[in-house]
Image: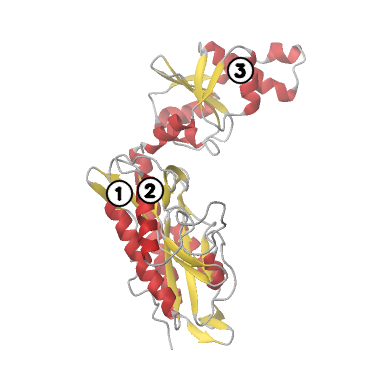
Amino acid sequence: MTDILIVGDTERSLELRHEIPLHVGDQFLYAETNGRRVSIVWSVEGDRIAKVDPTIELIPSETFSPTDLIEAGVGLYDLGPAQLARQVTSLGLARVAVPDNFPVRIADELRGVGVELVVDQRLFDDRRRRKTAAELEGIRTASRANDAAMAAIADALARSEPGDGGRMLDDEPLTAELLKTFAAEVFAAHDCRGDDMIVARGPQAADGHDQGSGRILNDDIVLCDLFPMHVDSHCYSDMTRTFFVGTPDPEFVEWHEQTAEALELARSLVRPGANGANVHKAVCSFYEERGHPTALSKQEGEVLRDGFYHGLGHGVGLDVHEAPSLGRVGHDLVVGDVITIEPGLYRHGVGGVRLEDIVVVTEDGCETLTHFPLGHDPVVQTRA
C-alpha cells in the first residue's frame, strides 16, 4: 500500500479537502501509512475534524515543541518546515506519494532529512473522482441553484423591452452585470457562491472565457456559463445556455440546433469504460460533417478561433475543472465520475453558441444533474 502525505490547508489543497471535508485555514499534515489515517493538527482544529470524521487519528501539533529550534536560532521562515519534518519523521514515513502542488519549501526540508517524495497527481485525481456522498449531494445542491439562476436570467431577458441603445428592464438598461447580479442573488438563497460567472453578449460569446459586460442589445446573443459552488461542501456545478433576444441571426439558430444535437450525441456515449477522447472525437466528427472546423481537423500549429475549438468537457467536484478529461487526450470514465458535456460553435468577432450539462456516470449510462431546458427554440420571447 502506498504511503500518502498531504500538507496544506483545505481551502487551497483540494486533495486535503477531499479527505477532511471542512474549512481549515492553516497549514497542517495528513498522512496514510500502514493502515492508519492520521492528521497532525492544532488541537482546536482536531476537535472539529473529529466531528466530521472520527476514523482519523488525531495528534495535536502542540506536542511538537519548537522551543529548542527557536533557542538554536532557527528563523521564522525556517521554523515551520523544520516542525513539519519532525512530524513526518515521527510517523515513520520514508517514501510517500504527494500531489503536484505539494509545497516546495516543505519538500526541500523533507528530502533533507531523508524522506523520498514521489509526485503522483493521477493517484490523487483518482481518489477525488470517487465522490463521497456529501460531495455528490453538494454537487446536486449547486446544480439546483444553477437551474434556478438560469431561470432568473431567462425571465429577465423575456421581460425586457427594446429601447434606445439596447434592452430595458423595469425602466432600467439591461446589462450583463445586472443579469449576473440576479444569478448571484439566487445562488446565495441556495447557500451557494458564484460571483465568477460568464454572461457574454454578442461578439463576447465567441471568446470562451470572456466574462461578459455591457448593455444587452435589442437583437443579441447572450451566452450564460454559470458555475456556482455550494459553500458547505465546497462542491461545484457547471451549466451553459445560450439565449437570443429580439430577431436572431438564422445561422446562429441553426448552430444552436446542431449544438443541442451534439450534446445529446455525447450524452448517449457516456458510460463506464468510454474514453473521454473518443467521445470528444465523435462530437468533432459530427460538427465536421456539417462543415464546421474543429480542434481535430485544424492544421498542426494553427490557431483556431472559429468552429468547435475547445475540449468537450471535464470533471467537476471540489473544483470546477478537474479529472477526468474529455478532450484530445481523455480518461476512461468510471461509475461515479461527474463530468460536463459542453459542445459549442463560434465565429471570432461575431458571436457563439455553447450548451453544457453536468452528468454523473452510472452503471448503464449517465444521470443529468442540470435540468434547465436546452431550448430547442432558443429565442427568448421578449416583449415587442
- 81 relative to 5 in the view: left or right: right
Residue visible at 62% across and 23% down in the picture: 106
Which amino acid type is marked by label 3?
Answer: Leu
Q: Quadrant of residue 210?
A: bottom right
Residue 325 percent location from the top left of the image: 42, 44
Q: Nearer the viewer, residue 258 or 125?
A: 258
| Mark 2 neighbour class, 10 Å CA radius: few under 14, some 14 to 19, many 20 or more | many
Q: Please, is residue 155 above or below residue 236 in the view? A: below
Q: Please, is residue 261 above or below residue 83 in the view? A: below
Q: In whole angstroms, how far apart are the C-alphas of marks 3 and 2?
A: 36 Å
Q: Nearer the viewer, residue 276 or 137?
A: 276
Q: Are marks 1 and 2 in contact (CB under 8 Å)?
A: yes
Q: Quadrant of the C terminus?
A: bottom left
Rendered image: mark on residue 270: 1
Q: Nearer the viewer, residue 377 or 268?
A: 268
- Look at mark 2 in the image and give the residue it sits on: 339
Q: In whole angstroms, how far apart are the C-alphas of marks 1 and 2?
A: 10 Å
Which amino acid type is marked by label 1?
Answer: Val
Q: Please, is residue 198 above or below residue 173 in the view? A: above
Which amino acid type is marked by label 2?
Answer: Ile
Q: Quadrant of the N terminus?
A: top left
Element marked by disc 2: strand
Tag in front: 3 or 1: 1
- Which sits earlier in the primary sequence, circle 3 or circle 1? 3
Tag in front: 1 or 2: 1
Residue 366 percent location from the top left of the image: 27, 49
Element marked by disc 1: loop
Residue 165 percent location from the top left of the image: 59, 84
Q: In whole angstroms, how far apart are the C-alphas of marks 3 and 1?
A: 43 Å
- Look at mark 3 in the image and give the residue it sits on: 110
